[in-house]
Amino acid sequence: MQITSAMKMVSAAKLKRAQDAIVQMRPYAEKLQEILGNLSATLDLSENAYSEAREVKNILIVGITSNRGLCGGFNNNIIKRVKGLVNDDFADSNVKVLCLGKKIKDVYKKTDNYYINDDLAAVEDIFNDLTFDNVAIIGQNIMELFQDKTFDKVIVVYNQFINAASQNVMTEDFLPIIPVIEEGNNSGGDYIFEPGKSEIVEDLIPKSLKVQLFKGLLDSQASEHGARMTAMHKATDNANDMKNELTLSYNKARQAAITNEILEIVGGAEALNG
Protein backbone atom coordinates (compact mmCIF):
# COMPACT_ATOMS: atom_id res chain seq x y z
CA MET A 1 0.00 0.00 0.00
CA GLN A 2 2.87 2.36 0.78
CA ILE A 3 4.51 1.55 -2.57
CA THR A 4 1.35 2.10 -4.62
CA SER A 5 0.60 5.29 -2.68
CA ALA A 6 4.09 6.61 -3.44
CA MET A 7 3.72 5.69 -7.13
CA LYS A 8 0.40 7.53 -7.22
CA MET A 9 2.02 10.69 -5.84
CA VAL A 10 4.91 10.46 -8.33
CA SER A 11 2.50 9.98 -11.26
CA ALA A 12 0.39 12.92 -10.06
CA ALA A 13 3.46 15.18 -10.08
CA LYS A 14 4.49 13.98 -13.56
CA LEU A 15 0.92 14.29 -14.81
CA LYS A 16 0.83 17.99 -13.98
CA ARG A 17 3.89 18.69 -16.17
CA ALA A 18 2.72 16.41 -18.99
CA GLN A 19 -0.78 17.88 -18.91
CA ASP A 20 0.58 21.42 -19.07
CA ALA A 21 2.72 20.42 -22.08
CA ILE A 22 -0.15 18.95 -24.10
CA VAL A 23 -2.58 21.74 -23.16
CA GLN A 24 -0.07 24.32 -24.39
CA MET A 25 0.68 22.31 -27.53
CA ARG A 26 -2.87 21.60 -28.72
CA PRO A 27 -3.90 25.15 -29.74
CA TYR A 28 -0.74 25.55 -31.84
CA ALA A 29 -1.16 22.15 -33.50
CA GLU A 30 -4.85 22.73 -34.18
CA LYS A 31 -4.22 26.21 -35.61
CA LEU A 32 -1.46 24.85 -37.82
CA GLN A 33 -3.82 22.18 -39.13
CA GLU A 34 -6.51 24.82 -39.66
CA ILE A 35 -4.19 27.04 -41.69
CA LEU A 36 -3.06 24.07 -43.75
CA GLY A 37 -6.68 23.10 -44.35
CA ASN A 38 -7.56 26.63 -45.44
CA LEU A 39 -4.65 26.75 -47.85
CA SER A 40 -5.35 23.29 -49.25
CA ALA A 41 -8.87 24.41 -50.14
CA THR A 42 -7.41 26.77 -52.76
CA LEU A 43 -4.25 24.88 -53.69
CA ASP A 44 -3.79 21.72 -55.71
CA LEU A 45 -1.85 19.40 -53.41
CA SER A 46 -1.69 16.59 -55.95
CA GLU A 47 1.80 17.68 -56.92
CA ASN A 48 2.99 17.61 -53.30
CA ALA A 49 5.03 14.54 -52.40
CA TYR A 50 3.17 14.05 -49.12
CA SER A 51 -0.32 14.03 -50.64
CA GLU A 52 0.32 11.55 -53.44
CA ALA A 53 -2.55 9.08 -53.52
CA ARG A 54 -1.52 5.65 -54.78
CA GLU A 55 -2.59 2.04 -54.46
CA VAL A 56 -2.16 0.97 -50.85
CA LYS A 57 0.05 -2.10 -50.69
CA ASN A 58 2.57 -1.27 -47.97
CA ILE A 59 1.36 0.22 -44.68
CA LEU A 60 3.29 1.56 -41.71
CA ILE A 61 1.53 1.62 -38.33
CA VAL A 62 3.12 3.82 -35.66
CA GLY A 63 2.10 2.40 -32.28
CA ILE A 64 2.72 4.62 -29.25
CA THR A 65 2.79 3.04 -25.78
CA SER A 66 4.76 3.65 -22.57
CA ASN A 67 8.05 2.15 -21.44
CA ARG A 68 6.62 0.93 -18.12
CA GLY A 69 3.51 -0.90 -16.97
CA LEU A 70 1.30 -0.63 -13.89
CA CYS A 71 -1.03 1.77 -15.70
CA GLY A 72 -4.18 -0.26 -16.15
CA GLY A 73 -5.26 -0.99 -19.72
CA PHE A 74 -3.29 1.93 -21.17
CA ASN A 75 -0.80 -0.19 -23.13
CA ASN A 76 -3.08 -3.15 -23.82
CA ASN A 77 -5.63 -0.91 -25.53
CA ILE A 78 -3.01 0.32 -28.02
CA ILE A 79 -1.56 -3.15 -28.62
CA LYS A 80 -5.07 -4.53 -29.15
CA ARG A 81 -5.90 -1.78 -31.67
CA VAL A 82 -2.63 -2.30 -33.57
CA LYS A 83 -3.19 -6.06 -33.71
CA GLY A 84 -6.70 -5.42 -35.01
CA LEU A 85 -5.32 -3.24 -37.81
CA VAL A 86 -2.62 -5.78 -38.68
CA ASN A 87 -4.73 -8.92 -38.56
CA ASP A 88 -8.13 -7.63 -39.67
CA ASP A 89 -8.27 -4.23 -41.37
CA PHE A 90 -5.07 -4.62 -43.42
CA ALA A 91 -4.70 -8.40 -43.44
CA ASP A 92 -4.22 -8.40 -47.22
CA SER A 93 -1.51 -5.72 -47.19
CA ASN A 94 2.16 -5.70 -46.28
CA VAL A 95 2.19 -4.12 -42.82
CA LYS A 96 5.10 -2.93 -40.68
CA VAL A 97 4.89 -1.59 -37.12
CA LEU A 98 7.05 1.24 -35.80
CA CYS A 99 7.14 0.77 -32.03
CA LEU A 100 7.44 3.94 -29.94
CA GLY A 101 7.48 2.64 -26.37
CA LYS A 102 8.99 -0.45 -24.78
CA LYS A 103 5.68 -2.23 -24.16
CA ILE A 104 4.65 -2.46 -27.80
CA LYS A 105 8.25 -3.12 -28.80
CA ASP A 106 8.30 -6.19 -26.54
CA VAL A 107 5.33 -7.53 -28.48
CA TYR A 108 6.66 -6.97 -32.01
CA LYS A 109 10.45 -7.07 -31.75
CA LYS A 110 10.47 -10.86 -32.27
CA THR A 111 8.18 -10.68 -35.30
CA ASP A 112 10.44 -9.88 -38.23
CA ASN A 113 7.42 -9.62 -40.52
CA TYR A 114 6.18 -6.51 -38.71
CA TYR A 115 8.98 -4.94 -36.68
CA ILE A 116 10.72 -1.97 -38.31
CA ASN A 117 12.51 -0.08 -35.52
CA ASP A 118 15.95 -1.27 -36.55
CA ASP A 119 15.48 0.46 -39.91
CA LEU A 120 14.86 3.88 -38.35
CA ALA A 121 17.01 6.16 -36.22
CA ALA A 122 16.30 7.91 -32.92
CA VAL A 123 13.37 5.77 -31.78
CA GLU A 124 14.93 4.18 -28.72
CA ASP A 125 13.99 5.71 -25.37
CA ILE A 126 12.15 8.59 -27.02
CA PHE A 127 10.21 9.19 -23.80
CA ASN A 128 13.43 9.70 -21.83
CA ASP A 129 14.02 12.92 -23.77
CA LEU A 130 10.73 13.88 -25.38
CA THR A 131 11.54 17.04 -27.30
CA PHE A 132 10.32 18.34 -30.64
CA ASP A 133 13.81 18.07 -32.14
CA ASN A 134 14.03 14.34 -31.32
CA VAL A 135 10.50 13.68 -32.56
CA ALA A 136 11.22 15.66 -35.75
CA ILE A 137 13.97 13.16 -36.62
CA ILE A 138 11.50 10.29 -36.42
CA GLY A 139 8.91 12.27 -38.38
CA GLN A 140 11.45 13.07 -41.08
CA ASN A 141 12.41 9.40 -41.40
CA ILE A 142 8.75 8.42 -41.76
CA MET A 143 8.18 11.08 -44.42
CA GLU A 144 11.23 9.88 -46.36
CA LEU A 145 9.91 6.30 -46.28
CA PHE A 146 6.64 7.59 -47.75
CA GLN A 147 8.42 9.70 -50.37
CA ASP A 148 10.56 6.84 -51.66
CA LYS A 149 7.39 4.68 -51.82
CA THR A 150 8.53 2.20 -49.19
CA PHE A 151 5.09 2.77 -47.68
CA ASP A 152 1.89 3.92 -49.33
CA LYS A 153 0.04 4.77 -46.12
CA VAL A 154 1.08 5.70 -42.57
CA ILE A 155 -1.23 5.42 -39.55
CA VAL A 156 -0.58 6.61 -35.98
CA VAL A 157 -2.22 4.85 -33.01
CA TYR A 158 -2.02 6.55 -29.61
CA ASN A 159 -3.96 7.40 -26.46
CA GLN A 160 -5.51 10.87 -26.52
CA PHE A 161 -5.51 12.55 -23.11
CA ILE A 162 -8.96 13.57 -21.89
CA ASN A 163 -8.40 13.68 -18.13
CA ALA A 164 -6.60 11.68 -15.47
CA ALA A 165 -9.22 8.94 -15.53
CA SER A 166 -10.10 8.92 -19.23
CA GLN A 167 -8.14 8.33 -22.43
CA ASN A 168 -9.33 7.68 -25.98
CA VAL A 169 -7.51 5.34 -28.36
CA MET A 170 -6.99 7.36 -31.54
CA THR A 171 -6.25 5.96 -35.01
CA GLU A 172 -5.18 8.83 -37.26
CA ASP A 173 -4.10 8.86 -40.89
CA PHE A 174 -0.64 10.44 -40.97
CA LEU A 175 0.21 10.07 -44.67
CA PRO A 176 -0.84 10.73 -47.35
CA ILE A 177 -2.39 14.13 -46.65
CA ILE A 178 -5.97 14.33 -47.85
CA PRO A 179 -6.84 17.81 -49.18
CA VAL A 180 -9.61 19.51 -47.23
CA ILE A 181 -12.73 20.16 -49.28
CA GLU A 182 -14.43 23.32 -48.08
CA GLU A 183 -18.20 23.60 -48.37
CA GLY A 184 -19.52 26.64 -50.22
CA ASN A 185 -17.27 29.54 -51.09
CA ASN A 186 -15.71 29.89 -47.68
CA SER A 187 -11.96 29.61 -48.10
CA GLY A 188 -11.34 29.85 -44.38
CA GLY A 189 -9.74 33.28 -44.42
CA ASP A 190 -7.82 35.75 -46.54
CA TYR A 191 -4.01 35.62 -46.48
CA ILE A 192 -1.18 37.59 -48.01
CA PHE A 193 1.45 35.11 -49.17
CA GLU A 194 5.15 35.92 -49.19
CA PRO A 195 7.07 34.58 -51.09
CA GLY A 196 4.17 32.48 -52.42
CA LYS A 197 1.44 30.05 -51.52
CA SER A 198 3.19 26.98 -52.94
CA GLU A 199 6.46 27.70 -51.14
CA ILE A 200 4.67 28.25 -47.83
CA VAL A 201 2.67 25.02 -48.10
CA GLU A 202 5.76 23.03 -49.05
CA ASP A 203 7.41 24.24 -45.86
CA LEU A 204 4.24 24.04 -43.76
CA ILE A 205 3.32 20.44 -44.58
CA PRO A 206 6.51 18.78 -43.19
CA LYS A 207 6.36 20.96 -40.10
CA SER A 208 2.68 20.19 -39.60
CA LEU A 209 3.35 16.45 -39.83
CA LYS A 210 6.13 16.64 -37.27
CA VAL A 211 3.92 18.68 -34.95
CA GLN A 212 1.14 16.14 -35.36
CA LEU A 213 3.47 13.29 -34.34
CA PHE A 214 4.83 15.33 -31.43
CA LYS A 215 1.29 16.06 -30.23
CA GLY A 216 0.49 12.33 -30.33
CA LEU A 217 3.52 11.54 -28.17
CA LEU A 218 2.65 14.30 -25.68
CA ASP A 219 -0.93 13.04 -25.54
CA SER A 220 0.35 9.53 -24.88
CA GLN A 221 2.73 10.68 -22.16
CA ALA A 222 0.03 12.62 -20.31
CA SER A 223 -2.39 9.70 -20.71
CA GLU A 224 0.20 7.30 -19.30
CA HIS A 225 0.70 9.31 -16.11
CA GLY A 226 -3.05 9.79 -15.72
CA ALA A 227 -3.72 6.08 -16.22
CA ARG A 228 -0.97 5.11 -13.78
CA MET A 229 -2.17 7.59 -11.16
CA THR A 230 -5.70 6.19 -11.44
CA ALA A 231 -4.46 2.58 -11.35
CA MET A 232 -2.27 3.22 -8.32
CA HIS A 233 -5.14 5.05 -6.58
CA LYS A 234 -7.34 1.98 -7.04
CA ALA A 235 -4.50 -0.32 -5.97
CA THR A 236 -3.96 1.76 -2.82
CA ASP A 237 -7.67 1.61 -2.00
CA ASN A 238 -7.71 -2.16 -2.56
CA ALA A 239 -4.63 -2.59 -0.40
CA ASN A 240 -6.23 -0.49 2.33
CA ASP A 241 -9.40 -2.63 2.18
CA MET A 242 -7.27 -5.78 2.37
CA LYS A 243 -5.37 -4.37 5.35
CA ASN A 244 -8.65 -3.62 7.13
CA GLU A 245 -9.93 -7.12 6.41
CA LEU A 246 -6.70 -8.71 7.64
CA THR A 247 -6.73 -6.52 10.76
CA LEU A 248 -10.31 -7.59 11.47
CA SER A 249 -9.42 -11.25 10.92
CA TYR A 250 -6.37 -10.91 13.14
CA ASN A 251 -8.39 -9.26 15.91
CA LYS A 252 -11.06 -11.97 15.71
CA ALA A 253 -8.42 -14.69 15.87
CA ARG A 254 -6.67 -12.98 18.80
CA GLN A 255 -9.98 -12.53 20.60
CA ALA A 256 -10.83 -16.21 20.05
CA ALA A 257 -7.42 -17.27 21.35
CA ILE A 258 -7.81 -15.11 24.47
CA THR A 259 -11.32 -16.52 25.05
CA ASN A 260 -10.01 -20.06 24.75
CA GLU A 261 -7.23 -19.32 27.22
CA ILE A 262 -9.75 -17.85 29.72
CA LEU A 263 -12.00 -20.88 29.33
CA GLU A 264 -9.06 -23.20 29.92
CA ILE A 265 -8.08 -21.28 33.06
CA VAL A 266 -11.65 -21.27 34.38
CA GLY A 267 -12.04 -24.97 33.56
CA GLY A 268 -8.77 -25.78 35.35
CA ALA A 269 -9.78 -23.79 38.43
CA GLU A 270 -13.14 -25.53 38.63
CA ALA A 271 -11.43 -28.91 38.32
CA LEU A 272 -9.14 -28.06 41.26
CA ASN A 273 -12.04 -26.86 43.37
CA GLY A 274 -14.00 -29.98 42.57
Image (tube, rainbow, N blue to C red):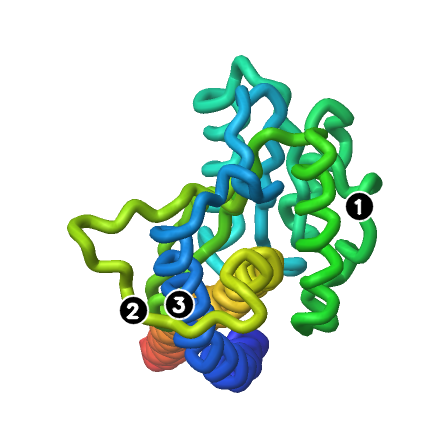
| Figure check: 225 above or below 117 | below
Q: Dot 3: what SS? A: helix
Q: Earlier in the sequence, mark 3 or mark 2?
A: 3
The image quadrant of residue 111 is top right
Query: Which residue occupies 34% across, 79% down?
Result: 266
Q: Quadrant of the C terminus?
A: bottom left
In this view, the residue farthest toward the top is 92
Dot 2 surroundings within 10 Å: few (below 14), some, or many (20 or more)?
A: few
Q: Nearer the viewer, residue 126 or 176?
A: 176
The image quadrant of residue 150 is top right
| Residue bearing mark 1 | 120
The kind of residue on which mark 2 rests is: Gly
Residue 151 visible in the displayed image:
yes
Q: Dot 1: what SS? A: loop
| Residue bearing mark 3 | 30
| Residue bearing mark 2 | 189
Q: Position of residue 2 (x, y in %)?
A: 55, 80
User: Which dot, 3 or 2, sits closer to the camera?
Assistant: 2
Q: Nearer the viewer, residue 123 or 260?
A: 123
Q: Position of residue 115 (x, y in %)?
A: 73, 34
In this view, the residue farthest toward the left is 184
The kind of residue on which mark 3 rests is: Glu
